[in-house]
Amino acid sequence: MSAGTDRRESSAASDLLSAEDLRARLLAVGHERYHHKHPFHLLMHEGKLTRHQLQAWALNRYYYQSIIPIKDSIILSRSGDPEFRRAWRKRILDHDGAEGEPGGIEKWIRLAEATGLEADSVTAGRGILPAVRYAVDAYLDLVRERSFLEAVASSLTELFSRDLISLRIGALRQHYPWLESGLMYFTARLSQAPEDAAFALDWVTRHACTREQQDAAIAALSAKCDILWAQLDAIYYAYVQPGWPPPGALPAEAS
């Protein structure tokens, strides 16, 4: 082996983040980019959204909820490790439900109904914003087309969701008490999300073995945060300011 090769390998090893540093970098992505800071969520938590704006949010977010088990099935199908598959398939049951127990999708439909929407209209996808469809479909593209490591790393937004959900439950109960019957989704995720995130974080930390892989995992998590943010951008633009929903979307609130 040449001296030049030795130097390159030594440099690559020195650039490799420790497990602790990689976790810190991933957590920093959430602090900076997670959608807990989006103006739409801030208005929600301050009790400043109308029923119609919450309907628009519940309807459009349903499209994202509906693809989560599809996303997880894609990830599952890409793994050759039985141990990984056994751990990951729980996510599909959490959202699709099992043995007569409602899953996350059905619970989200109940939330949409609590806002005043009809379940059949929600599941049919009528009125969903085109930009929301593009953003959600981009998430499926990410888990299909990028490396398996990046697909798993993109799920790490769950590291940040518990704090947001805890805040949201309190805010919704305080400002929109008529939503109480639809909060089952959030109460379930308080325990589901941290468990899922802990497994994925440990897996990513152990399998990102080069600095290039570590950087790819961080970038995948950033991309997922962008996807979540873009959905709220579309909802805010259509139903808050300036309030211009495109043709075919849920109409603007009657003045």
Image: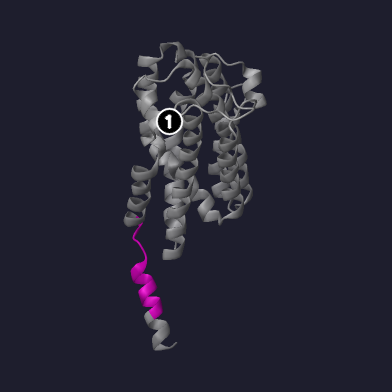
- Indicate left or right for 116 with 16 as reference: right
Q: Is residue 110 above or below residue 18?
A: above
Q: Mark 1: which amino acid?
A: Ser
Query: Taking the image as drawn, is residue 68 in sight?
Result: no
Q: Position of residue 236 (x, y in %)?
A: 46, 30
| Crowd class of label 1 (few under 14; some 14 to 19; many from 20; radius 10 Å) | few
Task: Give the residue displayed 44% in from the left and 42% down from the top.
Answer: 157
* Placement of the N terminus among the 4 image quadrants: bottom left
Query: Which image quadrant is residue 212 in?
Result: bottom left
Q: Is residue 12 magenta?
A: yes
- Left or right of residue 194: residue 72: right
Q: Is residue 208 above or below residue 158?
A: below
Is there any visible trace of residue 243 in the rendered image? Answer: yes
Single out the residue that lies furthest toward the bottom: 2
Between 97 and 51, the one nearer to me in the picture: 51
Q: Work out whether residue 21 or residue 230 is closer to the camera in this orientation and state it.
A: 230
Find the residue positioned furthest to the top: 178
- Tell me the residue at 54%/37% (across/down): 91
The residue singled out by tag 1 in the image is: 191
| Image coordinates for residue 15, horizontal then vertical, percent | 35, 68
Please give the count of numbered marks on the rendered protein.
1
As rendered, which of 122 and 217 lies closer to the eye?
A: 122
Is 241 placed left or right of 23 in the picture? right
Q: Which residues are magenta?
A: 8-19
Rendered location of residue 123, percent (x, y): 64, 24
Label 1 sits on a secondary structure element that is helix
**Secondary structure that dominates the magenta span:** helix
Q: Position of residue 222 (x, y in %)?
A: 44, 49
